[in-house]
Image (cartoon, rainbow, N blue to C red):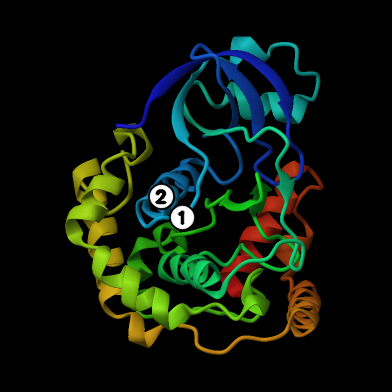
Amino acid sequence: MLDQVTALRYVDPLRAGGSVPGVVETDDLGTYVVKFTGAAQGRKALVAEVVVGELARRLGLRVPPLVLVDFDPAVAAHEPDPEIQDILRGSPGLNLGMDLLPGARDFTPGSLPVDAAEAGRVVWLDALTGNVDRTVHNPNLMVWHGRLWLIDNGAGLIFHHRWSGAAASVLKPYPMSAHALGAYRPAVADADAELAPRVTGELLREVVGLVPDAWLAGEPGFDSPAAVRAAYVAHLAERAAGSAAWLPAEFATAEELREAEARRAAATLAARPDWLKQVPNRHGKAQVEADWSRHVG
């Protein structure tokens, strides 16, 4: 199980992402960036954070420690933003905390030397888990003590948003056009040879077993959290075994990546359906648009 702590003080919201996580102090004297079950992405983003983050850790990548945070909305009664209060009031009980890395800075391509082996392992993990939210413009990587750290893995496992289509996506190729580490010539084939054999059923059961039952209960099409866990294990094990079908092989320069991302963003914006344009301009609209963009991308 992940360590469990209790929230004592809600410090501040982080408005950079659509989920609006918050900085929270807890009873273990820790300070965490907490993602809430009441945010627009819901509990599945937290499931992805646990599964992808803890899988990354076991494969040798750096991820800040994760904890379960027992949150009482009363500790954030001072938060003045009513939309954020909606999220907090909708998040009693277990939420997910990621250790705050003091002094860490956002990674931008070219800001840190990253060797081809490490870049390859990150890209391989993202390809395995279908994480399309580690781009040139939104790397979701931090630099701390001169090293690369993976954060914000909640956009992975996109297949679990529609289980009826999960089987068809097991061998879906990974879109590499704008990955944040693409310009580092990641050694993805070497990473595949190293990591794919380590993604065993036993390892996946260990990682998926860290997800609280409450985040898996009531999933349509499944009669128990155990059945949902088994589905995650089966999907990821099959994808790891079939990596030859989805393994990205070609990479562009940093400038080509920026141009490709700009073209993709412009095309996505132009193709927005009318119903999306009518979503109220609240904090949830940005997340709805982001989720739709990832889905169509």
Residue 172 in sight from this viewpoint: no
Vertical side of 128 occupied by 226: above or below: above
Q: 49 and 264: which one is in front? A: 49
Q: Quadrant of residue 148?
A: bottom right
State the residue lying farthest toward the bottom.
250
- The residue under the point 61% across, 52% down is 147
Q: Alpha-carbon neighbours of circle 2 within 10 Å: few (<14), some, or many (≥20)? A: some
* Three-letter code for the amino acid on which mark 1 is drawn: Leu
Q: Quadrant of residue 297?
A: bottom right
- Residue 252 screen position, x and y as percent: 68, 86
- Residue 43 screen position, x and y as percent: 47, 41
- The residue under the point 78% across, 48% down is 280
- Secondary structure category for the residue under label 1: loop
Vertical side of 64 occupied by 182: above or below: below
- The residue under the point 33% across, 34% down is 212
- CA gap between label 1 and label 2 equals 5 Å
Residue 57: give its label.
Answer: 2
Q: 23 and 192: which one is in front? A: 192
* Three-letter code for the amino acid on which mark 2 is drawn: Arg
Residue 171: give its label.
Answer: none
- Residue 122 screen position, x and y as percent: 51, 65
- Horizontal arrangement in the rendering, residue 252 relative to residue 267 (left or right): left
- Residue 175 screen position, x and y as percent: 56, 79
- The residue under the point 73% across, 30% down is 13
Vertical side of 35 occupied by 207: above or below: below
| Residue beneath disc 1 | 61
Residue 260 in sight from this viewpoint: yes
* Label 1 with label 2: CB-CB less than 8 Å: yes
